[in-house]
Image (cartoon, rainbow, N blue to C red):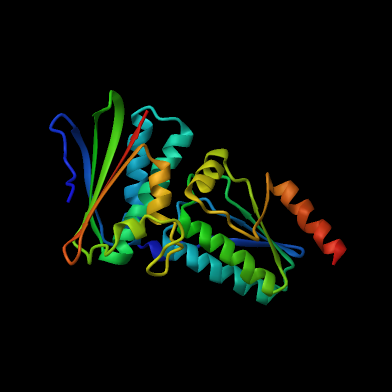
Amino acid sequence: MDFNEKRIPIIKIRDYLIVSIQVDMHDRLALQLQMQILEEISRTGAKGVLIDISTLEMVDSFIGRVLSGMASMASIMDAAVVIVGMQPAVAITLVELGLEMPGVDTALNMELGMEMLEKRLIKA
Amino acid sequence: MLEIVSDKSWKLLEKCQIQNEFDIVKARQTVRHFAKETGMGIVDQTRITTAVSELFRNMFMYAGGGDVVIEKGIVEENNTLIITCTDTGPGIDNVELAMTDGYTSGQGMGYGLPGAKRLVDKFEIVSVLNKGTTVRVMKWK
């Protein structure tokens, strides 16, 4: 099986990109997704990115770093990133691990995440 | 130097090797499977899976890979999952420093070892320069 073939789809709806991570990402896939999202922001001029991690069973320091790195990079490109749907067990583990993910906005679900982005766009 | 001792009563569940990034994913899924089987709740399953993911990545990044042994047994009267990671990498110069929050020798964030330790019930590490490192973590139900 060639894992490199796997790509996580990025869907554009109006000004937003929507990404739902539904696989246990290996490190390179996580980095590839980071690059893909930045390229899509640049290509489409999207103002916000919603990343759904509700099916992710764990976020370790690497994936955490990729997610927070993505948020900072997107912000430099004038797009806001909201991570949605983190499972309680993942949140507990992240904090115990010592990972604080500064600068990352989160919302409980996709709908609230979308509202968050919309409010931000109106303000801007 | 303290040595990592095994107990003969422990039962071997699985052995695997870490050689690339996919092995990290496979091995941590295997650990989760056994954590579930041991009867751990979802939070403990996530804790041990995350802890071993840090250890597996360390082996992959700093030692080019290594061996993983997953066992179960009774430790301090608890039903326990025991995961032992052994590599033949460069070893850790200063284990105490490596166990300090925020310390990193490379690309990492420095949460690997101390973070993993916080997520498990028992954490043992032995490292010999130019010989390798063995880390054993235990999580009980």
| Left or right of B112 in this view: A65 | right
Residue found at x 38% / y 32%: B36
Q: Quadrant of residue A43?
A: bottom right
The answer to which quarter of the image holds residue B12 is: top left
Q: Quadrant of the N terminus of chain A?
A: bottom left
Tell me where residue B136 appears, x and y as whole percent: 27, 45
Position of the C terminus of chain A by quadrant: bottom right
Residue A61 or residue A37, whichever sits in front: A61
Rendered position, B85 above or below A92 = below
Furthest residue to the right? A122
Does the image show residue A1? no
- Whether B50 is drawn above or below B102: the answer is above
Q: Position of residue A83 (x, y in %)?
A: 64, 54
Whether residue A72 appears in this view of the structure is: yes
State the residue lying farthest toward the left: B8
Q: Position of residue A37 (x, y in %)?
A: 60, 68
Task: Please give the name of the residue rendered at 81% of the width and 57% of the height, measured from the top-left corner.
Answer: A118
Q: Quadrant of residue A88?
A: top right
Q: Determine the residue positioned at 87% across, 62% down.
A: A122
- In the picture provided, is B32 more to the left or to the right than B130? right
Asked if residue B2 lies left or right of residue B47, the reply is left
